Amino acid sequence: MHPSVKLNLLFRDRIGVVADISSRLADQAMNIISMEVERKNDMADVYLEIHPGDRALSAKEVLETLSGIDGLQSIRIIQTLPNENRQNTFQTVLDNVSDGIVSIDGNGRITTINQLARTLLNCRNDDLVGHRLDTLASTDSTILACLDGTPHTRLRRHVSTEKGRFEFFSSARPIIDSAGRIIGAVEIMKEMKAIKALVEEVVQQEKITFDTFVGGTPSVKQAIAFARKIATTPAIVSIRGESGTGKELFARAIHAESMRIGPFVPVNCAAIPETLLESELFGYESGAFTGAEKNGRAGLFEQANGGTLFLDEIGELPPGPQAKILRAIQERQVRRVGGSKEIDVDTRIITATNRNLEQLVEKGAFRQDLYYRINVLPIHLPPLRARRDDIPILADHFLFQFNCKLGGALQRLSPEALEKLVNHDWPGNVRELKNVIERAAILCDGHWIDEASILFSFELTTSPASLGGNPQSPSNGNNLARQVAEVERRIIARAIGSAKSLRQAAIHLGISHTTLRNKIRKHNL
């Protein structure tokens, strides 16, 4: 079989160019395998693939045969025709997508198939285009039903091949021309393993970076710029700000840009009972106390080795643990409870508090030497009421997030709703704003969230049914136990809102810190 010759001829555009080329080649018994014509202004590019037939034909003879045609400007031998290039590019793209793709014409013959589809359909033959799909062994030809106008969506299928067993979801749709006729069908196959990997990636906790922060007020920009500058240093960072301003998110962003390969380990110093603080922070050896794990346990300083330990609400630490944390920071060593040796730790410390540490130092409630040790690089996060221009941006951001989570139509905030948000004092800051927007997204059935759907904590009644305008009366089931529980809930909520910490709220209520946390869980506060 003699090889074909591929040519590019440039003509001044005129009528009869294609006819003249065809006539010359026919006179020499040469076959035209393919021809493409591209017109550009008054010129015509003609691309040819010629087969010499039964005799050997040199490129020189081909060129001599076509030379002399009226209007011919140039002629050259090429390696690939434009359509070949397009087809190769198209096939390369198809073979590199993560889904299996196959299409058929109106007679059920394959017109397109990519590599993953070959695997999922258990087709080893490379030359499949032009074959009827239902004649191939071990293939499910449900796509043929689309030729009758019957689509299918997320049909679960599986196939066993030499490469193993594959499970996938298949969706197919008919291909319809401009006249409304079905001229073929296309099927998309999503492999189950890829779907599971995607789901795992989506449900994993989002990596927090400084790009995560929404807003553009100067104070926020300055805090981010300063944090980025110091992120890669080992220095201790102290984040100051009211509750709900995003101190932990800020700490996570610093860790993300610190280039430290260890984990980010957060601990709320106010949430751990004083009797357990030392063993939680520094760990313990086997037999250190009753109930200790047999092989001992690494503390949070060790767990964060090579990474970052975030000490939230550090102002709530009792005096005893303060001294031990100071020593661990200075010596970069810890000793487990019940242990006799020092353990080296390379742990970056980030602290956070909503308390005034300077006042605590003056009162003797916080060690002065620890204060100076952790206050090397302070960062102050502004309260939401000091960045009111960011409230509409943050509100739209949270609303979009919740709409995506709920899977419904996208909602918008009315001008009245935005005005109510901007004029609020926001004692709970960004955390409170997020909760208010989530509540509004759930309660509002329409596309526009109006002012009535923006409910702050003090506007909520104790009975969830009252949100729909039908508060329960005592005769409808509000027995004594329920009424007492509601009163307790209001008292605890008020104490938490007015106190600077849970520990302080527990003192005001005259109960232990553990009892308060149990009641918070009981009442879903």
Image (cartoon, helix red, strand yellow):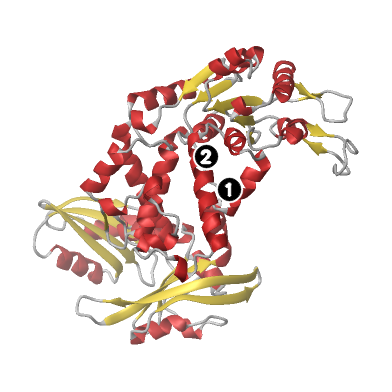
- The circle on residue 520 is 1
User: Where residue 471 appears, x then y in whole percent?
Assistant: 39, 63
Q: Is residue 173 left or right of residue 122?
A: left
Which sits in the foreground, 431 or 495?
A: 495
Q: Is residue 38 above or below residue 113?
A: above
Q: What residue is rendered at 57% in x and 81% in y? A: 138
- The circle on residue 298 is none
Q: Is residue 361 left or right of residue 437?
A: right
Disc 2 to disc 1: CB gap under 8 Å: yes
The number of numbered discs placed on residues in the rendered structure image is 2
Element type where label 1 sits in the image = helix
Q: What residue is rendered at 32% in x and 46% in y? A: 396
User: Where residue 117 appears, x then y in whole percent?
Assistant: 50, 69
Q: Amino acid at mark 2?
A: Ile
Residue 407 visible within the image: no
Element type where label 2 sits in the image = helix
Query: CA separation, marks 2 and 1?
Result: 10 Å
Q: Amino acid at mark 1?
A: Ile
User: Where residue 50 appears, x then y in whole percent?
Assistant: 32, 65
- The circle on residue 496 is 2
First in sequence: mark 2 or mark 1? Answer: 2
Q: Quadrant of residue 2?
A: bottom left
User: Where residue 26 appears, x then y in whole percent?
Assistant: 24, 71
Which sits in the foreground, 184 or 398?
A: 398
Q: Callout 2: 10 Å neighbours few (<14), some, many (20+)?
A: many
